[in-house]
Image (cartoon, rainbow, N blue to C red):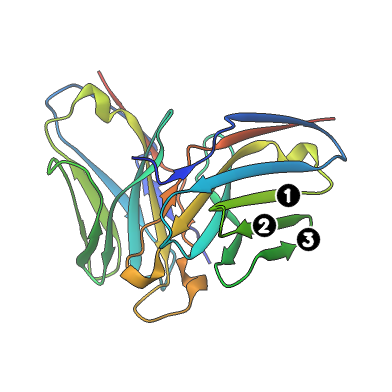
Amino acid sequence: KAGVTQTPRYLIKTRGQQVTLSCSPISGHRSVSWYQQTPGQGLQFLFEYFSETQRNKGNFPGRFSGRQFSNSRSEMNVSTLELGDSALYLCASSDRGTGEGLSSYEQYFGPGTRLTVT
Amino acid sequence: DQQVKQNSPSLSVQEGRISILNCDYTNSMFDYFLWYKKYPAEGPTFLISISSIKDKNEDGRFTVFLNKSAKHLSLHIVPSQPGDSAVYFCAASDSQTGANNLFFGTGTRLTVIP
């Protein structure tokens, strides 16, 4: 099976702009989660989509949004970019639906999109 | 508020010796724990996990120990190999919430010296 893919891999934007990142999960996986990784903060959960619905959301401002399509591909959007949004954005997929075993918590990550805001 | 903590940002170990990476958590509702390994320019790769009903899980050279009363888990790598050099993240989840979000520590960079 192909792994999780993310595009683009690198992106440079200026403050105030908006950006859209894309993620294609492993075939058959319906859950897609997004994480932000910054030095000193580790990975922080942004949100999770399952069957085109946002199922969970982390503590990020409303400038961060996402969506999921019927083929499980997901996009993440950040509006009005700030310097502090510079980070590695990681997408992870899993086959966890509802009421499934704990092993389905294993998430498979893509290589990430490195966003630099200048 | 960091619910999962890895207090050692780095660790160096000689090849062939044991590597012990530590992780502490504060949320007593966490019941599933995972370790991920990350190489530069790649996403984290799942390594090993443990449910709160166990205190040990072993997979080849990797063993994870869980001490629920101390809210502490550790990853042992024996014997350590140069290819194990990477950043290791521990993560935790509360399965009762139905949420699929993992809480990650800040990572420990392991360097295995040949």
Q: Is residue B107 above or below residue A68?
A: above
Q: Chain of mark 2?
A: B
Amino acid type at image mark 3: Gly
Residue B89 in the image, given as x and y percentages of width and height: 54, 44
Q: Secondary structure at mark 3?
A: loop
Task: Please indicate, yes or no, whether residue A102 appears anywhere in the rendered image.
Answer: yes
Toward the viewer: A29 or B3? B3
Residue B16 in the image, given as x and y percentages of width and height: 88, 40
Query: Could you tell which of marks 3 and 1 lies nearer the N-terminus?
Result: 3
Residue B78 in the image, given as x and y percentages of width and height: 81, 49
Task: Give the number of the mark in front: 3 or 1.
Answer: 1
Q: Quadrant of the rendered structure where residue A117 is? A: top left
Q: Secondary structure at mark 1?
A: strand
The residue that appears at 43% across and 49% down in the rendered structure is B26
Task: Find out whether the residues at labels 2 and 1 contact each other: C-beta distance under 8 Å.
Answer: yes
Report whether A30 appears left or right of B40: left
The residue labelled by disc 1 is: B76
Task: Please indicate, yes or no, whether residue A115 appears anywhere in the rendered image.
Answer: no
Badge 1, how many Cα within 10 Å: few under 14, some, many 20+?
A: some
Toward the viewer: B95 or A54? B95
Residue B48 in the image, given as x and y percentages of width and height: 62, 59
| Residue placed furthest toward the front | B69
The residue labelled by disc 2 is: B64
Amino acid type at image mark 1: His
Amino acid type at image mark 2: Val
The residue that appears at 49% across and 58% down in the rendered structure is A3
The residue that appears at 41% across and 54% down in the rendered structure is B27
The residue labelled by disc 3 is: B60
Task: Find out whether the residues at labels 3 and 1 contact each other: C-beta distance under 8 Å.
Answer: no
Query: Could you tell which of marks 2 and 1 lies nearer the N-terminus?
Result: 2
